Image (spheres, rainbow, N blue to C red):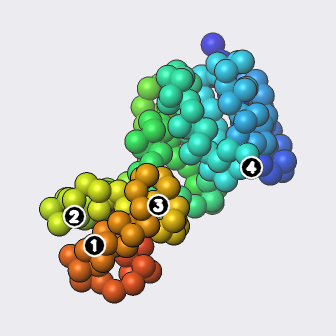
Amino acid sequence: MSIRLVLADDHPLILDALEHLFGLEPGFQVLARCWNGEETLQAVRQYQPDVLILDVCMPDKDGLAVLREMAQEQCPTRVVLLTAHLSEHEMLEAIRLGVHGVVLKVMATQHLVQCVRQVHAGKQWLDPHSISRALATFMRHEAGRRDMAAILTLREQEIVRLVAKGLRNKGIAEVLSISEGTIKIHLHNIYKKLHIDSRLALILSAQDKGLV
């Protein structure tokens, strides 16, 4: 029985190349080609393919957003990410969301075919170097979050996350339903506890410790 595929990439040339590649290989059937995230989700729901080959960078919804929705819907389709580059944070998020394979676009096409076959067989195909970097980042963030939890109250941690997302004091006050004056007091205490003196330093610290 053929391995049923949906291909998703925002570059028509890559879609053409992928369809040609799997057309030449025995045991594959391409069900649909998609160029954005929403179209990809619709195709997965309609065709329920064995494997989705998914680009990370796509319009409407990127690859990770597609993975999130598939995870929420408990979709049985196995996913191979095909990407030019994947940061440690993206790799961690992809693993958390249950991705089964990751192939860089610079790798030989035969690696992609092997990856899809392995993933379809119930195995994983993840680059060891990328995994080790991602795990190192994860461990650093876990330690950072523990440090923050030991120093800051839950409300202060919440405020730090909102600051790191770019919200100003007024916006944070609206989200938390408290006054701007209270936010200023919290920020003063946060700066003092973390030994920093600016909003930028707070954002950088939050990013380094994995709070965002």
Q: Is residue 101 left or right of residue 186?
A: right
> Is residue 130 visible to the viewer in this orientation of the structure?
no
User: Going 42% across and 53% down the picture, which residue do you hit?
Assistant: 176
Taking the spot 28% from the left edge, 73% from the top edge, the residue there is 190
Instruction: Report how far apart the C-alphas of labels 4 and 3 lie in the structure.
Output: 29 Å
Question: Between marks 2 and 4, how big is the CA–CA gap?
Answer: 38 Å
First in residue order: circle 2 vs circle 4: 4
> Left or right of 18: which side holds 3?
left
- In the rendered image of this protein, does residue 158 appear above or below residue 19? below
Name the amino acid, label 2: Leu
Residue that appears at 25% across and 54% down: 154
Q: Position of residue 114 (x, y in %)?
A: 55, 38
Q: Secondary structure at mark 4?
A: loop
Task: Please report the residue visible at 60 percent of the width from the left and 22 percent of the height from the top.
Answer: 50
- N-term mark: 1 or 4: 4
Number of marks drawn: 4
The residue at which mark 2 appears reads as 152
Spot occupied by residue 160 in the image (x, y as percentages of width and height): 37, 65
State how far apart marks 1 and 3 are (Cα): 15 Å
Q: Which mark is drawn over residue 18?
A: none
Report the amino acid beneath label 3.
Ile
